[in-house]
Image (cartoon, rainbow, N blue to C red):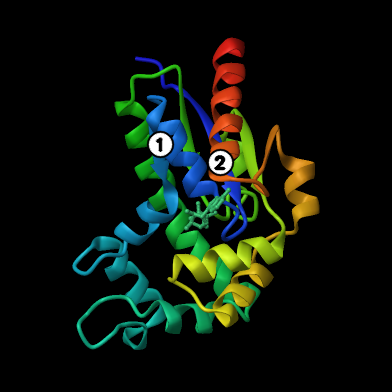
Amino acid sequence: MTRPIAIGLTGGIGSGKSSAATVFESLGVPVLDLDRVGHELVAPGSDGLHQLIQAFGKSMLNRDGSLNRAALAAHCFGSAEETARLNALMHPLIWQAEALWLDQQQADYVIIEASVLLESGGAGRMHGVIVVLADESLRLQRVLARGDRDEKAFVTIVARQCSDARRRAEANWLIENNGSLAELQQQVVALHRKISATL
Ligand code: ADP
């Protein structure tokens, strides 16, 4: 069986990429959330978490045995070497899970949603990349309204992610999400038609 065509969907925090993914899903396009896959691969009791602890030590665990993401981030993100070590461990696990998922899909094309697709070099595995863009001030407002991060966390994440200039340069398709949710939906529907017509 041939694998469906994989199209990446990315954008900075709060840009609206999950919202765009939901619209693709509503149109019948299978969506894999790679950030969620990454989380699940290091769930308590998983082989992935075991490997992380072997590599970075027990201080990366919370008392309840779950991964202490803040500790791991603090340990890795100041150091290119430690980040590379973390990526060398996680990326093959993520690629394997992605390949297994792709093998199970029956669709002309699928969407692989990932917040750091460009930064992680993942675009190379994709047939093309959709980038969702929105002004940073609007992204902050939306993230604060979403309620899962404060402004400090937003700024830290933005600093770790790539620039909009790079996103624009690497995108095959752009979605500008400075308007309403209805406008976002219209853009996704139009893009879906365009992509379907080229396959
Ligand atoms: P991301 O996945 O890129 O971090 P989300 O899709 O979760 O971003 O969007 C961030 C928040 O903004 C969510 O609560 C979402 O419902 C809201 N949102 C996204 N796009 C719009 C829009 N065009 N208008 C209003 N709210 C939006």
Residue 41 pos. (x, y %):
31, 58
Whether pointer 2 and pointer 1 mark residues with C-beta atoms closer than 8 Å, the reply is yes
Image side of residue 42 versus residue 127, left or right:
left
**Viewer-proximal residue among 11 and 26:** 26
Residue type highlighted by circle 2: Leu
Mark 1 residue element: strand
Q: Is residue 130 left or right of residue 189?
A: right
In the image, is 106 to the left or to the right of 146?
left
Q: What residue is at 37 percent from the left and 24 percent from the top?
A: 28
Query: Quadrant location of the N terminus?
Result: top left
Query: Image height check: is 184 above or below 44?
Result: above
| Mark 1 residue type | Val
Name above or below for residue 182 compared with residue 147.
above
Q: Dot 1 surroundings within 10 Å: few (below 14), some, or many (20 or more)? A: many
Tell me: residue 195, above or below residue 88. above
Q: Looking at the image, which is closer to me, 75 or 158? A: 158
Label 2 SS:
strand
Q: Residue at x 20, y 83 (%)?
A: 64
* Dot 2 crowding, Cα within 10 Å, few <14, some 14–19, many 20+: many
User: Which quadrant of the structure image shows residue 147?
Assistant: bottom left
Q: Label 1: which residue?
A: 31
Tag 1 or tag 2, which sits nearer the N-term?
Answer: 2
Distance CA(mark 2)–CA(mark 1): 9 Å
Mark 2 — residue?
9
